Image (spheres, helix red, strand yellow):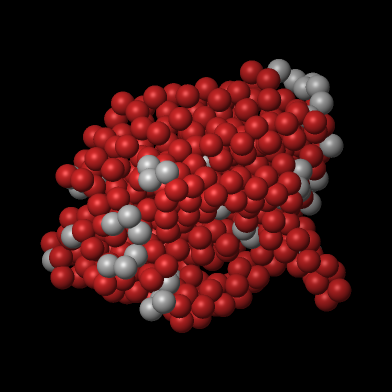
């Protein structure tokens, strides 16, 4: 599909207009964790190590439930492209039902097994105690986090990212205010940080449910059928996400075995990386929504054009983030800690983090494009294969601790490069355009 320069600029504006507020929906948990890291980091090394362990466990849980946003967005966009309003309602009802049930189950599992999971990651002593405290409290917020994920998926599928942004911006401000009062005003330590996050998550979930209820009419098909479809789509997405989480968890575990300063520096770098990567990943939202809607209208050339424009914008943005992150690498660690060893490790990690942003852009945007095409099996296969590229530096760092945080982040760079290469080949093949009816 050939577009004039005016049409391309108009499409770019549509992409950016949807991507900018989409950051609010995408960075809910990373922003909570950045706030926690900044607040808890000044309590000392043990609380920061405990937060690093707890955040790793919670990230795996939250990412495993990410299908609630991904599959809901794609399905809503596809049905909206077909003009099936009643079908959209059934999808939304199913997403909230699954989110509530799964959130309670995951919360119970974190309460029961959270401490053991943190210990498996290498936690011990005061750091492990801090992680266990944080996890027990944070488990209460998991059902509400999952409800927010489902609500974000609904609204994104409707090409509405502004409302999720506003909801989550308010909840993050509340979270920061509560943590400052609880941790520094009432001296509740890491427990106060966890309670502030839980209260903010409850408020965000309530707002999402209210907005969705106002915009959803009666379902024209059985909700149970959409529940089954959502759970079926969840399988490859969850496997893909677990494989993603495996690389993140393994990195934290390797850093923990290298040493406490390395783990604390890795925690700072990881939170900055998540924030930067999700800035680029915001482009995956319009990619997913527009591709899904165009396929619902059977306009494959238009879907291809949208995807190519999203990739171009993503790589330009990644270049800017590389320059900014590398320039700020010596300064950023001071925001999170006063420990000189931790600051040095974090600086090294941040330099590598900045250099790898081009691969993050390719991986995240291509993820969005293939999510919009409901090509979930390709995403699963790619993530599993990418772990092979991650392994060499990861194993080398385990064997030789002198590689330190550099070894950990070089492994993650190879992982992202492999994802970009494999997903890029699939996108260029256009084989996703002839998948069975979604």
Left or right: where 399 falls relative to 16:
left
Residue 405 in the image: above or below residue 100:
below
Q: Can residue 179 be seen in this view?
A: no
Which residue is at the front of the view, 375 or 339? 339
In what quadrant of the picture does the C terminus appear?
top right
Q: Is residue 313 visible?
A: yes
All told, the count of numbered labels is: 0
Question: Residue reaching furthest left?
Answer: 399
Residue 93 in the image: above or below residue 394:
above
Where's residue 61, x and y in %? 42, 38
In what quadrant of the picture does the N terminus appear?
bottom right
Which residue is at the front of the view, 191 or 99? 191
Residue 8 in the image: above or below residue 110:
below
Left or right: where 166 falls relative to 178:
right
Where's residue 387, x and y in %? 34, 54
Left or right: where 135 falls relative to 2:
left
Where's residue 192, x and y in %? 42, 42
Left or right: where 337 falls relative to 163:
left
At x 42% / y 55%, what residue is drawn?
39
At x 15% / y 70%, what residue is drawn?
402
At x 72% / y 42%, what residue is drawn?
155
At x 80% / y 31%, what residue is drawn?
214
Where's residue 302, x and y in %? 77, 58
Residue 411 in the image: above or below residue 238:
below
């Amino acid at each position: 599909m050939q577009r004039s320069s005016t049409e391309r600029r108009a499409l770019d504006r549509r992409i950016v207009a949807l991507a900018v507020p989409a950051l609010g929906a995408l960075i809910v948990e990373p922003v909570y964790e950045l706030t926690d890291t900044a607040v808890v980091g000044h309590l000392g090394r043990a609380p920061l190590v405990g937060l690093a362990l707890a955040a790793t466990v919670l990230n795996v849980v939250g990412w495993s439930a990410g299908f609630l946003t991904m599959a809901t967005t794609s399905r809503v966009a596809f049905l909206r492209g077909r003009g099936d309003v009643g079908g959209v309602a059934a999808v939304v009802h199913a997403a909230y039902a699954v989110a509530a049930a799964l959130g309670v189950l995951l919360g119970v599992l974190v309460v029961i097994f959270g401490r053991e999971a943190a210990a498996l990651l290498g936690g011990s002593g005061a750091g492990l105690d801090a992680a266990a405290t944080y996890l027990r409290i944070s488990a209460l917020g998991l059902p509400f986090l999952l409800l927010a994920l489902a609500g974000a998926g609904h609204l994104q599928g409707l090409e509405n990212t502004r409302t999720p942004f506003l909801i989550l911006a308010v909840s993050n401000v509340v979270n920061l205010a509560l943590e400052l009062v609880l941790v520094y005003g009432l001296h509740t330590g890491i427990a106060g940080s966890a309670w502030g996050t839980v209260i903010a998550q409850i408020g965000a979930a309530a707002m999402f449910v209210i907005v969705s209820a106002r915009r959803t009419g009666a379902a024209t098909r059985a909700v149970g059928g959409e529940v089954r479809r959502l759970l079926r789509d969840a399988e490859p997405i969850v496997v893909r996400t677990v494989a993603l989480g495996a690389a993140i968890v393994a990195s934290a575990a390797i850093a923990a075995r290298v040493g406490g300063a390395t783990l604390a520096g890795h925690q700072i770098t990881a939170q900055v990386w998540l924030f930067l990567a999700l800035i680029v990943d915001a482009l995956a939202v319009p990619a997913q929504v527009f591709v899904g809607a165009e396929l619902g209208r059977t306009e494959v050339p238009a879907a291809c054009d949208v995807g190519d424009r999203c990739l171009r914008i993503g790589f330009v943005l990644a270049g800017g983030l590389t320059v900014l992150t590398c320039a700020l690498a010596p300064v950023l660690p001071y925001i999170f800690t006063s420990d000189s060893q931790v600051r040095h490790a974090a600086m090294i990690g941040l330099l590598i983090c900045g250099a790898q942003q081009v691969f993050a852009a390719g991986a995240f945007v291509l993820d969005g494009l293939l999510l919009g095409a409901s090509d979930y099996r390709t995403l699963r296969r790619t993530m599993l294969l990418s772990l092979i590229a991650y392994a060499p530096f990861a194993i080398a760092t385990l064997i030789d601790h002198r590689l330190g945080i550099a070894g950990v982040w070089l492994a993650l760079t190879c992982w992202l490069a492999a994802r970009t290469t494999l997903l890029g080949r699939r996108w260029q093949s256009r084989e996703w355009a002839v998948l069975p009816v979604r």
